[in-house]
Amino acid sequence: MSIVIENVGKTFIDPKKNEVTALENINFSINEEEFVVLVGPSGCGKSTLLNIVGGLLSPTSGSVYFEGITEKNPNLGIVFQEIALFPWRTVFQNVIYGLEEKGLPKKKQIEIGNYYIDMVGLSDFKDAYPKQLSGGMKQRAGIARALAVEPDLLLMDEPFSALDAQTRTLMQEELLTIWNRTKLNTLYVTHNIQEAVYLADRVIVLSRHPGKIKRIISIDLPKTGRNDEEYREKSSRYADEIWQLIRHDAEEALKE
Amino acid sequence: MDKQKKVITNRVAFLDKKVPFYASFVGILGLLILWEIISRIGIVSPLFLPAPSEIIVTGWQMLVSGEIYGNLTASLYRIVIGYAIGSVLGIIFGLILGFFKLADAVGTPIVYSIYPIPKIALLPLFILWLGIGELSKVTIIALGVFFPVVINTFSGVKSVDPMLVKAAVTFGSNRVNVIRKVILPGSLPMIFAGLKLAAGTSLLLLVSAEMIAAQEGIGSMVLHYGNLMITSKLMVGVLILSLLGLTFNRGLKWLENRLIPWKE
């Protein structure tokens, strides 16, 4: 099964009634068990693209479809930048939300819910409300909620951007560990280049005005241990390559 | 050089200064004692202001004679039914107006044009339509409760984070479940603000309606003893109303804490 993004374009009408092209001619696919990272400067439309793939926004042109999927409708799990946990639900109730909506029997919900809460290390906080959690713990609950529906495509929209640098590093490591257990098809959006190189099988670099694919870079590194001494040089070469692609756009973005 | 020591002290300590818990009781108690003294000395005639002790004694007699019971149950019946109808309808309409764009466009101007009418002005009309019995009084209370609740529920719905709606839809919610599981709990804090506001309104309308057209009820009782210039019995009525309002507020507060344990 793969997810195909075909000729996707998106235009907005801005408050001054001008037509703004946010995305133009986006073509790529996410293959089985592949971790694809979208990276680009602010305003390149990467979150817009993720929302289109997630079915939260309609494209002006083109389409997104699942290939090689039978019987059922594709299942999506999204981890939001804003985390978007329901404040009136405990961690456990948040995690099983998707299962509840699918109409799974209670026993199954509890079983799956506990499994993923344990996976993100929140077992001790199962019955806590989101307000009682730290930023990192909230996002772990958000990840567990997305994993619990066992999605055909996992979408992550800058999930760690609200976290402090230390928590962020730890969460990236944890995410990789979890990903290696679940091997979900993943589309991950970030503006952080190191994060992109650390996590991705392939990095899609976007330009801005309009958002277009500038280059697709396959990261030829083992999936784990990319921070190890022996891969550090190669990692930083990838990061540098991406930075050179983005730099000019990022500078332009700064002037706005 | 001489080394001088300058200790830095917390200059905003006054912000988290603790006040002893009994302070709030001291205020009320002090006022009551002052009032009692003024009445006892005879500066003010008991016809205008009876002493607190006298009010309590009179209250006890009225309680024993069953006079309070009859009037209070009549009042409670009206306010409970009116408040229940008004708040339930207010919440339902508020959710609908807030969630459906068409209902908003059609209904909101209607709500806002009726809202500023002082509801008691409609009582004669309701008496004309529904008769002088319980129905007109219950209706006017329900109407008075409906508006603050509907308007607060409406803005509560509007204040729900759209991200949460997106999240719910992503994880498979249909429209009904979005309302039930996201919009309703998300607007509960605002709904409660409306319910508290409406509690005051309902009490006001209850007393006014009873003063205008009722044989029984705390409102008519207060008016009756006012006309007879039996001030201590009048004050008992006022005291009951104060207790009623207090209980009402406490009850809502309790319910709010039970229903919204997740609030910041």
Image (tube, coloured by chain):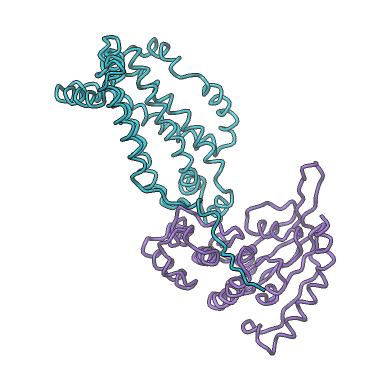
Chain colours: A purple, B cyan
Front in this rendered view, residue B139 or A62: B139
Q: Is residue A37 above or below residue B12?
A: below
Q: Quadrant of residue A243?
A: bottom right
**Of residues A37 and A159, which is closer to you in this image?**
A159
For the point 50% across and 54% down, the residue is: A86
Q: Quadrant of the C terminus of chain A?
A: bottom right
Q: Based on the displayed image, in which of its 4 quarters is residue A128 positioned?
A: bottom left
A237 or A6: nearer the viewer: A237
Whether A135 is drawn above or below B155: the answer is below
In the figure, is residue B79 to the left or right of A206? left
Q: In the rendering, at what x and y percent does residue B70 appear?
A: 21, 22
Q: Position of residue B221 (x, y in %)?
A: 27, 17
Residue displayed at 43% across by 57% down: A103
Q: For the N terminus of chain A, which image quadrant?
A: bottom right
- Measured as percent of width and height from the top left, residue B2 is found at 64, 72
Query: Height in image: A84 above or below B212?
Result: below
